[in-house]
Every structure is written in structure tokens, then in C-alpha cells.
């Protein structure tokens, strides 16, 4: 079976990568299609090419993507290989690692994959070692048949005067700003208004699954995007945030539950969320636990040093 490789060349390639993610999705898959859209468009980016310091490459067989590599930087590689194609998985994995080796000039390299990932043999052969205690992502799922009821407002936010609703198309600046404000105490969020407007054009974004909380004065104070992959019926929560001054009032939980109710009405049966770095910040994990999410799978960090 001939396998070919191509450099990332625009939205069509992202869509082909997402199609692979949809085709092979399970709770143990590294990426949900919506995660790729978020990762790509959460900052200003030229849709036609990788961002600065990034490289993305696709491997193809039978007209489909069977693997991709997304080097977020010279020392950090994300990848996913089509687990449903054992006939090509090993060869693709070896090619992905060799491609990263060629492209990266970092003396210490990190590859981030799921536990028992099809790339493990290739990683070991290339000299990477698994660091199971290192920082990792955990995937959590929730059957939407068990989604908590949505109590009537104002009981739910514990403080009267908040409104939960989908974002309006005329408030893109405010929507991008509430995201940046929610992340302001963690690090620089780069979701400019222009980036957010570009994100809204990416599949599988749906405005009816992009929810906000407005306070009494109409200011947006919390938000969530749910990405519904209609092929799988799996709805990814990414991201959820609440501005620092309004935390601890149940707003992030309320807006997430509200958006997931809408996703269920639109055909979702399962919700997915990924947390990382829990030891540093238990908040997100606690938030998702209170909604009913349970951990099902995790990533492993593999490293090698070329010193
Ligand atoms: C995490 C975050 C969204 C929580 O927002 P919030 O509106 O304060 O959360 P809620 O009030 O809805 O809390 C829901 C539950 O999580 C718990 N929780 C929230 N933040 C917590 C924290 N930092 N530590 C421990 N528990 C926390 C709450 O106590 C509550 O549980 P309870 O009902 O048992 O008391 C907010 O802190 C934030 O925006 N952080 C930065 C962005 C981020 O990390 N987003 C999540 C990853 S995408």
C-alpha cells in the first residue's frame, strides 16, 4: 500500500485530519475533530500555513489521512496515527518520527501520545523514553443520558442576575475578550477578535454551542465552546472559562451544562473534555467531576535527549 506525505497546505488539510479523527474516534483517541479546530485557530494564524515555529505534516493512503504530525515547536511533537489501519500504522509511525527528527533542531525533544499508542514501537526504536509521571492530559467522558438537569435561573448561578445564552454574532469582540480575561491569570491567551472570527468559520463550530454568561450589566463573564462531531455524536468541551472576579459562583458549571443540553438536543450522546496539569490547578478537574465527567484515558510524554 503506497503511503505518501504532504506538508500542511491549508483548511482542506485540516479538514482531512479532522476526518481521520472522526473516523477512528474512541475515548482513547488523542484528538477529537473539534480539538484540532481549537488548537489551530485559538490564536491569529494564516489558515494556509502552519504558525511560526510550527510544522504540520500529513500521511495519506487510499485518499485518506492515516496519520499526521503537528510539531508545535522544535521540542514538542503532537501526533495521531490511524489505529484502524494496522497495515500502515507502523510504517507511518516510523515516518512521523523520522520527519520530526529531520525538522527539529532541539537538543531535547518531547512527543506526546496516548497510553499504548500505535507509535510506541517507533518511539522506542528512535531512542525516546516514556516519562509516565510527567505532565499529561487526561480524557474524561460523560454519557449525556446522565447530564445533570438544568435548574431554573437564578437558583443555578447562586447569585441572581446572570443570563446564560448562546453568544450573538454581533459580539465577537466581547466574546474573545471574555476568553482572554478568563485566562489572564494563567498565561497569555491569544484569542484576538480576528482569531475568534476565523475560529467561527472552522468546522465543526456551531454558534448555538458557543455559550456565554452575562452579568446584570450585560458584560460577558464566563463562556464555553462545545464542538459537536455529528459523525460520532461526541461533543467536546473546549474551552470553558470564567473571569477571576466572578469565580466560585457556579457560572462555569452552569454554562457548560447549558451548552451540553443544547448539544444533546442536536444529537450528541457523549461529552468529552481533556484536562492537563491537575497537580498545579485542580479547578478544571473538579469542575468537570461535578458535572459527572469521569477519567477514561491519558497521554504519556516521551522524551529523548540528543546531547
Ligand atoms: C476553572 C474555572 C473555569 C472554574 O470557573 P468557576 O465559575 O469558578 O467554577 P464553578 O464555580 O462553576 O465551580 C464548579 C465546581 O468546581 C469547583 N472549582 C472551581 N474552581 C476550583 C478550584 N480552583 N479549585 C478547586 N475547586 C474548584 C467548585 O468548587 C465547584 O465545585 P462544588 O460545586 O463542589 O463547590 C475558572 O477558574 C477558570 O476560568 N480558570 C481559567 C481557565 C481554565 O482553566 N479553564 C478550564 C480548562 S479549559
Image (tube, rainbow, N blue to C red):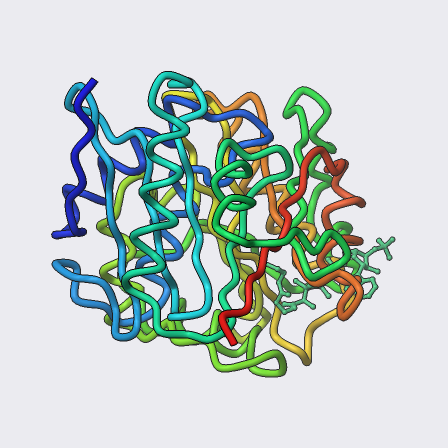
State the image quarter where residue 144 is shown. Answer: top right
Q: Residue sitting at 37 percent across and 71 percent down? A: 191
Work out whether 117 lies above or below 54: above
Q: Residue drawn at (55%, 35%), measured in percent from left and top? A: 117
Frontmost residue, 10 versus 255: 10
Residue 84 lies, in percent from the top left, at 42, 18
Q: Judge from the rendering whether residue 17 lies leftward or rightward of residue 135; answer left or right.
A: left
- Image coordinates for residue 93, horizontal then vertical, percent: 39, 38
Q: Nearest the camera: 150 or 257?
A: 257
Q: Residue at x 12, y 58 (%)?
A: 48
Residue 297 picture quarter: top right
- Does residue 230 sit above or below 271 in this rendering? above
Q: Is residue 302 left or right of residue 133?
A: left
Image quarter of the N terminus: top left
Total numbered labels: 0
> In the image shown, does 33 or 91 lie closer to the viewer?
91
Using the rendered view, name the quadrant where residue 159 is placed. Answer: bottom right
Indicate left or right for 134 with 66 as reference: right
Q: Position of residue 217 (x, y in %)?
A: 53, 75
Q: What residue is rendered at 18% in x and 40% in y?
A: 5
Percent across and percent down for residue 58 are: 24, 42
Q: Is residue 238 left or right of residue 151?
A: left
Ligand 1 shown in quarter: bottom right
Please, is residue 211 above or below residue 258 in the view? below
Amino acid at each position: 500500500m503506497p503511503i505518501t506525505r504532504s506538508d500542511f497546505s491549508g483548511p482542506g488539510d485540516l479538514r482531512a485530519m479532522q476526518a481521520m479523527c472522526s473516523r477512528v474516534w474512541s475515548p482513547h483517541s488523542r484528538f477529537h475533530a473539534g480539538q484540532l479546530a481549537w488548537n489551530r485557530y485559538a490564536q491569529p494564524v494564516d489558515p494556509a500555513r502552519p504558525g511560526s515555529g510550527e510544522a504540520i505534516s500529513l500521511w495519506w493512503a487510499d485518499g485518506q489521512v492515516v496519520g499526521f504530525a503537528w510539531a508545535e515547536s522544535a521540542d514538542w511533537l503532537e501526533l495521531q496515527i490511524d489505529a484502524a489501519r494496522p497495515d500502515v500504522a507502523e510504517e507511518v509511525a516510523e515516518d512521523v518520527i523520522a520527519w520530526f527528527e529531520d525538522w527539529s533542531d532541539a537538543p531535547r525533544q518531547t512527543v506526546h501520545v496516548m497510553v499504548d499508542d500505535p507509535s510506541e514501537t517507533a518511539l522506542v526504536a528512535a531512542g525516546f523514553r516514556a516519562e509516565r509521571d510527567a505532565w499529561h492530559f487526561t480524557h474524561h467522558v460523560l454519557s449525556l443520558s446522565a447530564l445533570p438537569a438544568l435548574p431554573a435561573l437564578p437558583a443555578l448561578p447562586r447569585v441572581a442576575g446572570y443570563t446564560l445564552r448562546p453568544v450573538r454574532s454581533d459580539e465577537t469582540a466581547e466574546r474573545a475578550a471574555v476568553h482572554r480575561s478568563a485566562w489572564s491569570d494563567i498565561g497569555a491567551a491569544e484569542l484576538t477578535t480576528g482569531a475568534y472570527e476565523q475560529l467561527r468559520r472552522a468546522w465543526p463550530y456551531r454558534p448555538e454551542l458557543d455559550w456565554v454568561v452575562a452579568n446584570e450589566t450585560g458584560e460577558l463573564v464566563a463562556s464555553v465552546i462545545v464542538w459537536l462531531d455529528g459523525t460520532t455524536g461526541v461533543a467536546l468541551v473546549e474551552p470553558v472559562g470564567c473571569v477571576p472576579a466572578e469565580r466560585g459562583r457556579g457560572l462555569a458549571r452552569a454554562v457548560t451544562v447549558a451548552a451540553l443540553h443544547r448539544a444533546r438536543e442536536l444529537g450528541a450522546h457523549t461529552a468529552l473534555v481533556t484536562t492537563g496539569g491537575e497537580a498545579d490547578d485542580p479547578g478544571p478537574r473538579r469542575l468537570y467531576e461535578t458535572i459527572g465527567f469521569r477519567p477514561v484515558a491519558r497521554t504519556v510524554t516521551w522524551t529523548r535527549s540528543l546531547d
